[in-house]
Image (cartoon, helix red, strand yellow):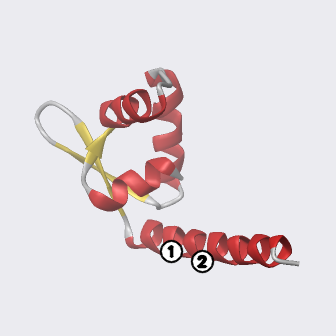
Amino acid sequence: MITIKALEKEIISTYDIIKLYKNRYNVLLSPGTVYPIFSAMEQLGYIKRISNRHNKLYILTEKGRKSLAQFHLEVGKIQKIISDIANI
């Protein structure tokens, strides 16, 4: 979900995702981990690949945006349930 969230804000490459995880979470992902994830998301229609001269860049599709919005809605429901339980 972090990957889709990053795509929500900008056009990115797989290298950008590797840097994001390293800088933000101190986790080093290999290209062999990231490429299959991007490939699967592309096949599912959540992202679209666009290429420039040097990189494969990716953008979030409308289907990806809807999926992300649904995810946020579900997370909100879960947070409310947890809050309600905590306040019992």
Q: Which mark is residue 45?
A: none
Q: Name the secondary structure under disc 2.
A: helix
Q: Quadrant of the C terminus?
A: bottom right
From this viewpoint, is residue 58 visible? yes
Q: Residues within 10 Å of mark 1 (few under 14, many from 20)?
A: few
Q: Name the secondary structure under disc 1.
A: helix
The residue sitting at 69% across, 78% down in the picture is 77
State the count of labels: 2
Contact (Cβ within 8 Å) of mark 1 with mark 2:
yes
Q: Residue furthest front?
A: 87
Up the image or down, 82 lies above or below 54; here it is: below
Is 7 displayed left or right of 1 in the figure? Answer: left
Up the image or down, 84 lies above or below 9; here it is: below
Amino acid type for the residue under numbered disc 1: Ala
Image quarter of residue 7 = bottom left
Residue 19 image position (x, y, % from top left): 34, 29
Q: Which residue is mark 2?
A: 73
The residue sitting at 44% across, 33% down in the picture is 21
The residue sitting at 66% across, 74% down in the picture is 74
Q: Which mark is residue 69?
A: 1
